[in-house]
Image (cartoon, coloured by chain):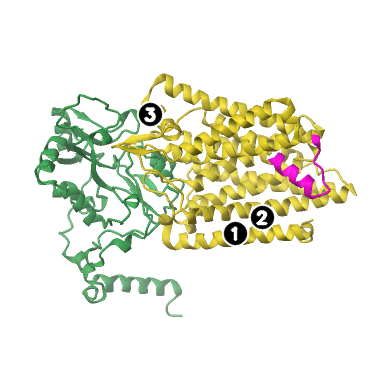
């Protein structure tokens, strides 16, 4: 089946070349970071995690969202998802790889990464994150590959895949829960120290991931002879709608708890993110435009999604999905991670802005994710086209 | 076969050790390294069930007000080869001063003793009994000894900085740059390792000095006896005497980390 990855159209090769170029440029930035240390990033003593970890957090959600097509199809026998399931699983694979790469590029001593396995520490949530992410990667790769191969040969999938598929459902929930636990278990970081964080993560994952899947389905349909089906896209759109509303609802719960109780620690980060903080006559509010953009995008998305007319119209649905993706990418990425570090434990403010090489390295990881996604989707679509013919 | 591989390595290794330890070291090692031999006599290691420190804020403040004293911080920087990178965002801090309101952000009080407002307070790693940094470390590069000292293994640390996110006291620093670039090789103390870029570091209560029977560098250098160090489990220790006689506070005790740096006002 792998041979399908090496025969393609001019556009396919062009796309791969473009991604490789992006990866190349980003890799040069990474070599520079290896040589100079993380000093080339915008990170500091006070904001010790930034763009990389923000991307990591967001893409764990994208990876977990595969369950939103796997669950209806395999547990509820929802036939319409028959064609998109493979696209969901093959989206999870590059998403998990990106997560792992974002952790590695964030490390001060990446050559020591195996210490996590050499000296396993089950007390650390990072250990469990490693276990759950690598397990999830393997599950999706095996399930996706075997079921696709069987489809190509027109035989039923082997029986041992079924238990793996069922296992992948709670496993998807676990990867994002554990990722939330990375943050939610830390004393003194008020924005993160909240029991609802895992629920928030799952809600944002289940809107952002399927939104991306809808966009990808539309691209696949436009550029290939494989059609994932109008009904599948519409059902995904409903999932996105409910999850996005829940996501914003959970955010508002946080706002209520903080601002009605008036406990300073519960308000500070939100005040910084949405209105800025003042300290010694100096105003800090670098993330204000980002956060309000996120909220505006969320409002647009919900309006377009809730209204049946605009949800059924695929053009407006596409706009809504892009808005969902953008809104959650800001809110759950930079908003959550950087917001958690501001104010710092001394209740003073150090702001954070990613540097150019930091953005370059981030684009490298996006490029690698895009490359894996393109190759896997190419294989899946070729098989589907072949079977249909 | 006269000498097998194992013996060969053993003999070679012993020879090297002896060679470095002997007089040859003076010629072989850079000038600063010879300091090792002029170090104070190795004494019996200081031991405790639970090390703790008391900061006498009154004594400390009056000295700082008089001449801007930073003796403890300077002694610590010398003892542990702590560099000062040019970018303050990359600063490495083991013991330093923070304004009172920032050191104790939970103690909001607009009418606090005016002698305290905005005044510098010494802060350092709290050597918590329940350290969140140790809990989160994915490689056990940071760990808690039985005597309560929270230590770092600079060679195991992968630089993920999870401990920095977990520490509610801002007591951990990361080597964003190669620290050796900012150290004067002649002024480097060979008794304590310099670090490499990409690892985290923090105050270690001078574990390396305690092992040689010496008090922590900051405690030793403080002429005004504003820093009191001792065994918290020993009712006759200096720390217990002070804590018995005066009102003390700790930083953010409500977080359940059980900090072991006490402040008497």
Q: Earlier in the sequence, mark 2 or mark 3?
A: 3
User: Which residue is drawn at the image coordinates 31% and 36% (left, top)?
Assistant: A279
Mark 1: give few (<14), some (14-19) or many (20+) Cα within 10 Å.
many
Drawn side of residue A363 relative to residue B221, left or right: right
Q: Residue furthest bottom?
A: B1
Q: Which residue is mark 1?
A: A23
Residue name at image x 17 percent, y 31 percent: B243
Q: CA distance from mark 2 to mark 3?
A: 42 Å
Residue A371 bears which disc, if any? 2
Side of A370 where A6 appears, left or right: right
> Is residue A318 in sight in this rendering?
yes
Chain B image colour: green
Task: Give the CA distance from mark 1 to mark 3.
Answer: 41 Å
Q: Is residue A182 in view?
A: no
Residue B3 left/right relative to B64: right
Tell me the tag on residue A265.
3
**Quarter the C terminus of chain B occupies:** top left
Q: Secondary structure at mark 1?
A: helix
Q: Secondary structure at mark 2?
A: helix
């Amino acid at each position: 089946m792998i041979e399908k990855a090496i025969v393609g159209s001019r556009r396919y090769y062009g796309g791969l070349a473009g991604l490789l170029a992006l990866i190349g440029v980003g890799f040069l930035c990474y070599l520079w970071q290896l040589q100079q240390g993380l000093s080339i990033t915008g990170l500091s003593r006070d904001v010790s995690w930034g763009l990389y970890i923000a991307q990591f957090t967001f893409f764990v959600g994208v990876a977990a969202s595969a369950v939103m097509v796997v669950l209806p199809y395999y547990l509820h026998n929802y036939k319409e998802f028959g064609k998109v399931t493979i696209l969901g699983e093959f989206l999870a694979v590059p998403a998990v790889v990106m997560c792992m790469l974002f952790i590695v590029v964030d490390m001060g001593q990446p050559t020591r990464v195996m210490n996590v396995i050499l000296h396993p520490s089950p007390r650390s949530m990072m250990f469990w994150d490693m276990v759950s992410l690598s397990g999830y990667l393997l599950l999706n790769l095996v399930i996706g590959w075997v079921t696709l191969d069987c489809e190509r040969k027109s035989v039923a999938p082997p029986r041992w895949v079924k238990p793996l598929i069922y296992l992948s459902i709670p496993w998807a929930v676990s990867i994002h829960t554990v990722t939330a636990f990375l943050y939610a278990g830390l004393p003194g970081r008020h924005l993160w120290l909240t029991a609802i964080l895992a629920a928030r993560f799952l809600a944002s994952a289940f809107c952002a991931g399927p939104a991306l899947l809808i966009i990808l389905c539309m691209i696949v349909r436009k550029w290939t002879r494989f059609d994932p089906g109008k009904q599948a896209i519409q059902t995904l759109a409903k999932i996105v709608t409910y999850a996005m509303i829940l996501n914003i609802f959970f955010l508002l719960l946080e706002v209520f708890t903080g601002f009605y109780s008036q406990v300073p620690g519960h308000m500070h980060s939100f005040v910084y993110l949405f209105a800025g903080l003042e300290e010694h006559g100096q105003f800090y509010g670098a993330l204000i435009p980002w956060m309000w953009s996120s909220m505006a995008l969320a409002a647009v998305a919900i309006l377009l999604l809730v209204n049946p007319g605009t949800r059924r119209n695929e053009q407006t649905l596409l706009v809504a999905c892009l808005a969902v993706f953008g809104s959650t990418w800001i809110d759950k990425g930079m908003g959550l991670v950087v917001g958690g570090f501001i104010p710092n434990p001394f209740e003073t403010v150090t702001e954070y802005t990613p540097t150019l090489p930091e953005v370059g390295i981030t684009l490298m990881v996006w490029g690698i994710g895009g490359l894996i996604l393109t190759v896997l989707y190419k294989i899946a679509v070729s098989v589907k086209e072949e079977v249909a013919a | 076969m006269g000498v097998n591989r194992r013996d060969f390595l053993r003999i070679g290794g012993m020879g090297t050790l002896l060679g470095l330890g002997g007089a040859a070291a003076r010629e072989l090692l850079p000038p600063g390294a010879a300091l090792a031999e002029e170090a104070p006599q190795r004494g019996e290691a200081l031991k405790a069930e639970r090390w703790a420190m008391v900061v006498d804020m009154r004594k400390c403040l009056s000295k700082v007000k008089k001449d801007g004293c930073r003796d403890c911080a300077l002694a610590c920087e010398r003892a542990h080869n702590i560099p000062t990178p040019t970018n303050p965002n990359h600063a490495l801090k083991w013991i330093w001063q923070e304004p009172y309101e920032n050191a104790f952000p939970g103690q909001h009080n607009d009418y606090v003793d005016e002698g305290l407002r905005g005044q510098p307070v010494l802060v350092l790693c709290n050597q918590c009994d329940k350290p969140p940094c140790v809990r989160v470390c994915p490689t056990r590069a940071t760990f808690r000894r039985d005597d309560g000292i929270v230590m770092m293994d600079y060679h195991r640390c992968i630089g993920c900085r999870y401990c920095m996110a977990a520490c509610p006291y801002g007591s951990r620093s990361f080597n964003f740059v190669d620290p050796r670039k900012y150290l004067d090789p002649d002024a480097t103390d060979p008794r304590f390792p310099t670090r490499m870029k990409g690892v985290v570091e923090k105050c270690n209560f001078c574990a390396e000095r305690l092992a040689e029977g010496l008090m922590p560098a900051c405690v030793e250098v403080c002429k005004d006896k504003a820093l009191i160090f001792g065994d918290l489990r020993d009712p006759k220790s200096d720390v217990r005497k002070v804590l018995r006689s005066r009102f003390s506070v700790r930083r953010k005790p409500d977080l359940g980390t059980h900090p072991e740096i006490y402040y008497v006002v």
